[in-house]
Image (spheres, grey):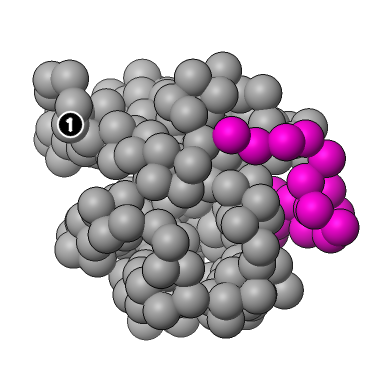
């Protein structure tokens, strides 16, 4: 563990700095995301978002496994392990990745074209791969802090679910189960992640790294939407379905 400066921020200051990083930089403020939540995306643009976001979703358990591989604390590994099974499932037909594949199928994408990554944009791939690399190479408490965008996810999921039901009624209800499940999962995950971050980022150096890690995560989510907005400004470059 890094030893850094002797006097860390107090808990209230640390929490305030973490929340400020997310509140000012979270991707719900991105123009593409705002267009999606106000019903302005075409069917093709929405399919593009679903296909590209899947590359992020399928790499979440890879990122979490990287954090586990760097963590020497058994109690922390026990707490973190469920994130992998939440996304991978413990048997076929379960888990967040499967739920996202059903979302893709509900929008008209085939499972094959979603899994084979044919629609994944270079900018999206670069951002997601950078996130996995970050989790592999940074101290595990800092990598945990990068996941704290989940602090803002329940409100985003609630808004997204309402927007999809209102503006995109052509998507059947069964395709939206991922969003429903994250309303509760994201809240529980963020509470645990925040507790670990506050406990183990126990020097000012680690606390400052944690704030930068959360800002980095916000930036890469923003960069993914930048890539999609640029590629799909006049409709997708490739045909979907």
For the residue carrying disc 1, how many other residues have a C-alpha within 10 Å: few (<14), some (14-19), or many (20+)? some
Q: Is residue 238 visible?
A: yes
Q: Where is residue 9 in the image (x, y as percent from the top left)?
A: 46, 72
| 202 drawn magenta | no
Report the quarter where the C terminus lies.
top right
Rendering quarter of residue 234: bottom right
| 234 drawn magenta | yes
Which residue is pictured at 43% across the width and 61% down the height?
A: 170
Decide: is 190 above or below 53: below
Q: In this view, does 58 lie to the left or right of 229?
A: left
The magenta stretch spans which residues?
220-241
Which residue is pictured at 13% across the width and 20% down the height?
A: 91
Rendering quarter of residue 215: bottom right
In the image shown, does 157 or 105 lie closer to the viewer? Answer: 105
Q: Is residue 219 visible?
A: no
In the image shown, does 208 or 129 lie closer to the viewer? Answer: 129
Which residue is pictured at 27% across the width and 59% down the height?
A: 173
Decide: is 96 above or below 13: above
Q: Position of residue 101 (x, y in %)?
A: 38, 35
Q: Position of residue 198 (x, y in %)?
A: 33, 61
Q: Position of residue 23 (x, y in %)?
A: 54, 79
Report the quarter where the N terminus lies.
top left
Q: What element carries label 1?
A: loop
Q: How many numbered discs?
A: 1
- Report the residue marked by disc 1: 94
In the image shown, does 23 or 116 lie closer to the viewer? Answer: 116
Q: Is residue 236 left or right of residue 56?
A: right
Which residue is pictured at 55% across the width and 58% down the height?
A: 214
Q: Is residue 172 left or right of residue 46?
A: left
């Amino acid at each position: 563990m890094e030893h850094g400066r002797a006097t860390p921020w107090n808990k209230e200051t640390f929490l305030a700095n973490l929340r400020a990083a997310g509140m000012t930089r979270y991707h719900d403020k991105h123009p593409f995301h705002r267009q999606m939540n106000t019903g302005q995306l075409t069917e093709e643009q929405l399919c593009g978002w679903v296909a590209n976001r899947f590359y992020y979703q399928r790499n979440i358990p890879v990122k979490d496994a990287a954090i586990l591989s760097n963590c020497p604390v058994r109690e922390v590994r026990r707490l973190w392990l469920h994130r992998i099974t939440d996304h991978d499932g413990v048997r076929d037909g379960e888990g967040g990745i499967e739920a996202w594949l059903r979302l893709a199928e509900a929008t008209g994408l085939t499972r094959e074209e979603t899994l084979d990554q044919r629609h994944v944009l270079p900018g999206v791939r670069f951002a997601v791969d950078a996130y996995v690399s970050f989790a592999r190479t940074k101290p595990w408490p800092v990598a945990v802090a990068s996941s704290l965008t989940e602090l803002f996810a329940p409100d985003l999921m609630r808004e997204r679910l309402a927007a999809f039901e209102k503006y995109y009624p052509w998507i059947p209800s069964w395709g939206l189960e991922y969003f429903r499940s994250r309303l509760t999962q994201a809240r529980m995950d963020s509470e645990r992640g925040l507790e670990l971050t506050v406990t183990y980022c126990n020097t000012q150096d680690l606390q400052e790294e944690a704030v930068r890690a959360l800002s980095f995560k916000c930036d890469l989510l923003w960069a993914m939407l930048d890539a999609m907005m640029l590629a799909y400004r006049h409709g997708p470059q490739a045909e979907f379905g």
